[in-house]
Image (cartoon, helix red, strand yellow):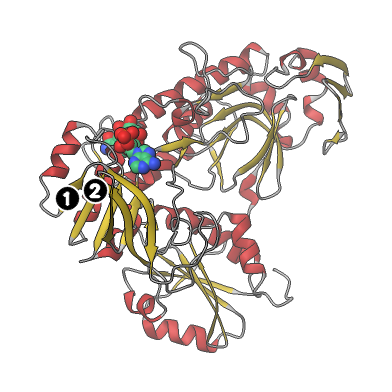
Amino acid sequence: MYLSRNGIRFITITSIVIAGTLGGLFFWHHVPHKSPAPLINKTFIETELGTRENIIPIAVIGSGPAGLMAALYSARAQYYTVVFRGEKPGGQLMGTTDVENWPGIAKKRGPDLMQGLEEQAKGCGVICASESIAQVDFSVWPFILETKEGAKVQALSVIIATGSLPKLLNVPGEQEYWGKGVTTCAVCDAPFYKDKEVVVIGGGDSAAEEALQLSAYAKKVTLLVRGERMRASSAMQERVKSIPSINIVYHAEIVSIEGSKTVSTGTASAGTASAGAHVTGINIKKNGVPELMKTDGVFLAIGHLPNTGIFKEYIDCDTAGYIHTIGRSQATSIPGIFAAGEVADHSYMQAGVAAGDGIKAALDATRFLGEHHIEPSLIQQFKSKLYNPQSEKRLALYKVVSMEDFDKLISTSAIPVIIDFYTLFCPSCLAMLPHLESVAAEFEGAVTICKVDGTELPKIMERYEVTSVPTMLVFKENMLIGRHKGSFSRAELAEFVQQFTAGKSAA
Ligand code: NDP
């Protein structure tokens, strides 16, 4: 039995769901992939909707080009729209250097483009929530979305724009040395490989892009392609082949990744190497012949998997996990749920196409709501019931500006000090800054959270062997007492900070 916040009960008996509402009872056959469409009727909307809490007429999950363009269009259509920015706000363009194929803009950095798009969407009235959706229930309407941060919202329509995640090799050493030389983000980590040797795995456009980014820093870049040719566009292949420091090795099968302090695991998923350990080489089979290649870094660029895990139970997906959309629309197998961008597209995979899909999804969603008599004017009637994540408290983060500043801070503070090392070219670092501000406000008085730009103060990074960003160091009474490498969601960050508060409650 599921008891919702306002006391409406949904009782599941094998395959029948009975929904008891204040306005009346509705029955429908409940099987996965079957829609709750019969519940969406005028009586329900007039009598029941206003009794619900945390309502969102159009909820957008994901904040890449598809999600933000969808939100921009639905907000311009006067629908209250909330974007759940997710774990990787801005999507894949946040990891792209120069974008030259965005309409009307000759050249712009990916992160700048996405920041501009988010500002544009906010200007149209879009609410951007620094939350991630952890669970959904699409068997009921309004659809239920639960955030990782603990909120439960009721969405009248949903646009899924969650994109895709990088594929992993699943070879020994990959997990052990993750963040210690193994990475998927050249734009984040390339500056740490100045005058070093690196390998890039893959033969697509992403691999070509990573190799080009790395060639600006590393003295040697080896592109390991498993087949006899690259899959990247001929223009990208030409650019890669024109750089003398990039060497392409074909017929290269990846066997394992070696490091300075290898742990005896035998599997890719078990164990992690100790702090200070780093990648030293990669075992490959070249035309079937084993070879240990020396390298300081391994950059994976072997494609992506759609981010559909939490939706698959409800929505029709293809065998690779991509959401199936109907005809030329962005509609999915459930009326009221739409999908846009790479989560539903494995053929074009371009930011411009994702943005276009987002626009179509918004037009589909607004049409869906209109057809069910849910006009913007009706939503005005239950304004106080709308979900508003903007009430979140924020504290401006103190930025450490010099070595002296840093030393003074960690030696004089009476409470633990958490330092976040970031750079302006690291997308996951930038995505985490709003979480840091919000968590700093939550724990004000119990811990001090500050940020250090690693490119401005590299000496502090060297002193504490910080080799990648984001990394967090925790100091108490001038002693280093904690360390974390990699990005956090807001919930994970709050949990990490909590352990250093020594019983003091958050402000
Ligand atoms: P792709 O699927 O295009 O390429 C993946 C590459 O990784 C292929 O060369 C593939 O080899 C290889 N690969 C896959 N699995 C393994 C493995 N286990 N071991 C070794 N190699 C492996 O993915 P991309 O991320 O490169 O590109 C996705 C889409 O995004 C494409 O449509 C691309 O055009 C687009 N894109 C465009 C960019 C641009 O315009 N600048 C930049 C980045 C991406 P094989 O060929 O043998 O299957």
Q: Nearer the viewer, residue 108 or 179?
A: 179
Quadrant of the rendered structure where residue 172 is?
Answer: bottom left
Which label was assigned to residue 247? 1
- Relative to 13, does residue 100 appear above or below in the rendering? below
Picture quarter containing residue 120? top left
Which amino acid type corresponds to the residue marked 2 in the rendered image? Leu
Residue 497 horizontal/vertical position (percent): 62, 68
Q: CA distance from mark 1 to mark 2?
A: 6 Å
Quadrant hosting ligand 1: top left
Q: Are marks 1 and 2 in contact (CB under 8 Å)?
A: yes
Q: Residue at x 52, y 26 (%)?
A: 74
Label 2 element class = strand
Q: Which residue is mark 2?
A: 223
Position of the N terminus by quadrant = top right
Q: How far from the left and from the top, in percent, is residue 257? A: 38, 58
Tell which circle, 1 or 2, labels the residue nearer the N-terminal end.
Answer: 2
Callout 1: few (<14), some (14-19), or many (20+) C-alpha neighbours within 10 Å? some
Question: Quick one: 375 or 230, which is closer to the camera?
Answer: 230
Q: Is residue 264 left or right of residue 117?
A: right
